[in-house]
Amino acid sequence: MILRRLALAGLALVVLVVGVLIVFQRPIGAALLGRVADTQVGRDSVADMPDGLNVALCGTGSPMPDPTRAGPCSAVIVGGKVFLIDSGEGAARTLSRMGIPASRIEAIFLTHFHSDHIDGLPPVLLQSWVSGTRTRPTPLYGPEGVERVAAGFNAAYALDTGYRVAHHGAAITPPTGQGASPVAFSIEGAAAAKGLVVYSADGLVVTAFTVQHDPVHPAVGYRFDYAGRSVVFSGDTAVSPHLNAMATGADLLVHEALQPAVLSVVEKRLDEKRLANLAQVMRDIVDYHATPEQAADAAKAAGVDTLVLNHLVPPQPLDYGYAAFLGDARKHFDGPIIVGEDGMLFSLPRGDDSMQRRRLF
């Protein structure tokens, strides 16, 4: 009898709660949205970052769909300024979720012009322009060919620019601040191996170097040095001696990775479903990317402290699958190997050799 009464009381309570939620759905929903706005609108996580090199992962995915990852995008934050490396689809949204204001973007560096590394540029450029009332286009650094990329996006969004200026006015959306301003560099001959300084200001030095991504040419990686700390981004590459040389002694190496053993499962399924074109693409991409084991070899050869893997192929929506994705990588490199996830932040403070790691969402 007592149990029955308790069950009935419990049922009545559930009915009451459900009834309250239904009757007061509108004000409760408004209150919840208000809470989200309080915590997210105007959020600026950059203000809390230590002096030094701060590395944020704003896109660790690839062209293959992954609900947990945006397209290729990394950010280096120095002295309150944000420098992006590539801008894949979804990068702007991920930056916003991380509390990294687009108004702080100082420049964008492209590693190459594959679509998945540039298809997130327009939203980033728009947010950088509108949120900070930028009066000059965002500098877009890249090897020769970046001029065509910038011109194409600028032309594609010219009508949009006109609409926004007409709607909001020149004080909010200065017509001179829209789009990208290309900063092209040539990296041939000796510079291809030794690297080419493409940016130097306020103690930050950015060096570009060639990598192996044939038939994609040019394709480059970048090394960022500041306050005695350093991080290297491979871009898309197969095994690359230039990368190993340029990453020597770096605190952090952010390296792309493709696991053929796992990708073969995707290829097999595509063949079974008679999707021959896509199956052939899976076979083709193996030869111009590096495996996790090869990325680990690069980290060991360069003597870096920590290896972070990004541009993950195939997608890794569950961390339970990381062991299969890594394969034997941990046998190739004794240091920490981290499978990159969107929202991760690595801080390399000035004055010591420590690394702080946390998530921004």
Image: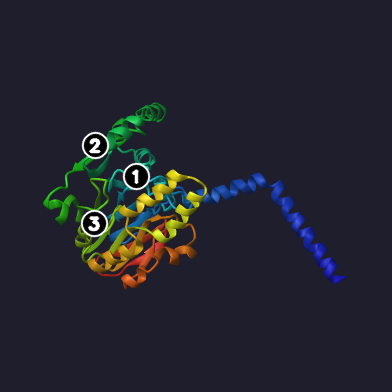
* Element under disc 1: helix
Residue at mark 2 to residue at mark 3: CA–CA distance: 23 Å
* Image-based side of 180 in relation to 281, left or right: left
Nearest to the eye among marks 1 and 3: give it: 3
In front of the other: 220 or 126: 220
State the quadrant of the N terminus.
bottom right
* Element under disc 2: helix
Task: Mark 1: give few (<14), some (14-19) or many (20+) Cα within 10 Å.
Answer: some
Q: Where is residue 340 shown, x and y percent of the image? A: 39, 60
User: Mark 1 or 2 closer to N-term?
Assistant: 1
Q: Quadrant of residue 289?
A: bottom left
Q: What amino acid type should be assigned to the residue bearing mark 2?
A: Glu
Nearest to the eye among marks 1 and 2: give it: 2
Which residue carries the number 1 mark?
103
Which residue carries the number 3 mark?
224
Q: What amino acid type should be assigned to the residue bearing mark 1?
A: Ser
Say which residue appears at 40% left-offset and 47% top-offset.
Answer: 280
Say which residue appears at 49% left-offset and 60% top-offset.
Answer: 318
User: Mark 2 or 3 closer to N-term?
Assistant: 2
Task: Mark 2: give few (<14), some (14-19) or many (20+) Cα within 10 Å.
Answer: some
Which residue carries the number 2 mark?
147
